[in-house]
Image (cartoon, grey):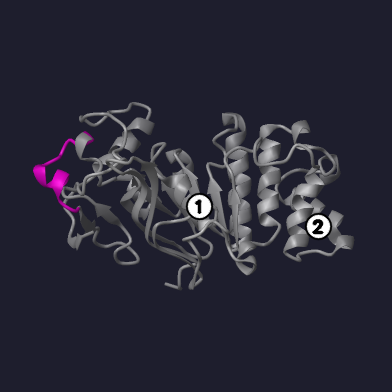
Amino acid sequence: MSRPLLDVRGLGVTFDRGGWARPSFLRAAHRVSFTVHPGEVVALVGESGSGKSTIGRVIAGLQPAATGQVLLDGTELPTAGTAGLPAHLRGRVQMVFQDPYGSLNPVHTVFHHIARPLLLHKRATPGELRQRVSALLEQVGLSPAEDFIDRKPQALSGGQRQRVAIARALAPRPDLLVADEPTASLDVSVRMSVLTMFRKLQKRRQLGVLLITHDLASARWMADRIVVLYAGQVMEQGPARAVLTTPRHPYTQLLVAAGSRRPEPLPGKPGLPPVVDPSPGCPFAERCPRVTFGCIDDEVTVHVAPDTEPPGAWRVRCHHPDPHLPTSGAQ
């Protein structure tokens, strides 16, 4: 397989909670590793608070990381500071935010929002701007463009605003798009139309996409591969359809059951993920029906599913996966 477009290696993000006598920290991401290849959609899924958006913001240069590396097409991105991505890389990584009402400035027109990145990244001359902006609006389904180009965001519906946000992200011709819950704030009736448009544009441009979502149906429909997060750690990752059809980690099974028409919740103790001063063991141990003493105290073993392409593509971070898989060692 070709070199990954995005290669995340052992990413860790912590937030200091203060405390004089006993310093405390919140671990938002821990040893997170995954890849996105050109033209591939990879979905990060998990409950609220699992670290999905934090990881996306690190990749986009909006959030510093404590440990690990993020490589874009083999070039390491700076992750230690808060200055953002270098100028020559900003156009290659773009982000679509969850809230279309908050991501667009109500003072400016649709034309301004899309023309600005075109000029900033030298994708159009001043004389070409209106034509290029109109073309982008047509691509995201806002047609005829002249009906939308001079409006302000408050004159648009939620779905139309999100299409403008997607057009703005596409303007610099990025290689990687980080889409953070791009349809979560939209009505159910317009979600599928926005996702369909988004998928068509992704295929046409051969974009690498990191889709951040809690909606398993969207992940199954959009993604080629899926990465399941819990308490900032990767529990399972592999081909999207296979992982969501026959999940092997107890947490993935719980997510799939909760999203089914007739959910059959796994037994176990519900509660918030242990992200504050966590123990070295599995973060899912308190809710897991197959928990043992080793799960609580020991570093978790990674198992690799056999007969997957490429080899090792389906990995489960669990002492007792279902069914049993070959062990690749503790991580």
Image location (x, y in percent) of residue 282: 22, 46
Image location (x, y in percent) of residue 126: 87, 61
Label 1 or label 2, whichever comes before in sequence order: 1
**Relative side of 320 to 240, left or right:** left
Q: Residue furthest front?
A: 20
Quarter holding the N terminus is bottom left
Which residue type does callout 1 highlight? Answer: Gln
Q: Which mark is residue 276?
A: none
Q: Residue tagged by mark 2?
A: 132
Q: Secondary structure at mark 1?
A: loop
Viewer-proximal residue among 94 and 203: 94
**Is label 1 or label 2 in front?**
1
Highlighted magenta segment, given as a residue range: 287-299
Image location (x, y in percent) of residue 226: 40, 51
Q: Residue tagged by mark 1?
A: 63
Residue at screen point 33% across, 61% down: 313
Q: Residue furthest left?
A: 293
- The answer to whether any part of residue 135 appears in the image is no
Q: Secondary structure at mark 2?
A: helix
Which residue type does callout 2 highlight? Answer: Arg
Residue at screen point 54% across, 35% down: 184
- The answer to whether any part of residue 23 appears in the image is yes
Viewer-proximal residue among 79 and 315: 79
